[in-house]
Amino acid sequence: IELDKKEYFTGEKAKVLFKTPFSGRMLVTLETDHVVSYQYINVENRSASVDLPLAAEHLPNVYVSATLIKPHSVSDNPL
């Protein structure tokens, strides 16, 4: 997970780049001591980017978390 800068102010948008080992669907969450918001994004060509608006509810710190889900048709593991 790469951000376009180190610090942000309320009202700004964080430009977030995800470089991934495979393409798929990704759950992106913004978290403090609880999950503030979440969204699903599609990852194509092993990367994705998203602009995340930052609000007062994200103070004093907010964390970006990502969970990448691989499609079953791509997996080499039998179920």
Image (spheres, rainbow, N blue to C red):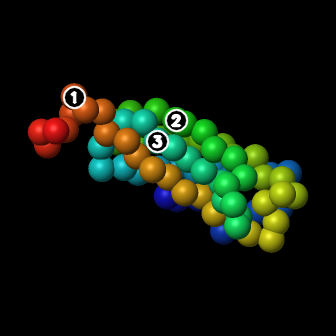
Q: Where residue 42 appears, x then y in whole percent?
A: 46, 33
The quarter of the picture where residue 73 lies is top left
Q: Report the disc number at residue 26.
A: 3
* Placement of the C terminus among the 4 image quadrants: top left
Quick check: 31 left or right of 73?
right
Q: Residue at x 87, y 58 (%)?
A: 56
Viewer-proximal residue among 31 and 55: 31
Residue at mark 2: 41
Above or below: residue 17 compared with residue 3: above
Residue at mark 1: 73
Q: Amino acid at mark 2?
A: Ile
Quick check: 9 left or right of 48?
right
Instruction: Judge the density around disc 1: few (<14), some (14-19), many (≥20) Cα neighbours within 10 Å.
Output: few
Q: Where residue 30 appears, x then y in whole percent?
A: 66, 54
Q: Is residue 56 visible?
A: yes
Q: Is residue 23 visible?
A: no
Q: Residue at x 14, y 43 (%)?
A: 77
Is label 2 in a helix, a strand or a loop?
Answer: strand
Q: Amino acid at mark 1?
A: Ser
Q: Amino acid at mark 3?
A: Met
If you read the primary sequence from the N terminus, does the residue marked by circle 2 or circle 1 appear first? 2
Viewer-proximal residue among 4 and 33: 33
Cβ–Cβ under 8 Å for marks 2 and 3: yes
If you read the primary sequence from the N terminus, does the residue marked by circle 2 or circle 3 appear first? 3
Q: Distance of mark 2 from mark 3, alpha carbons?
A: 5 Å
Q: Where residue 23 appears, x then y in whole percent?
A: 34, 38
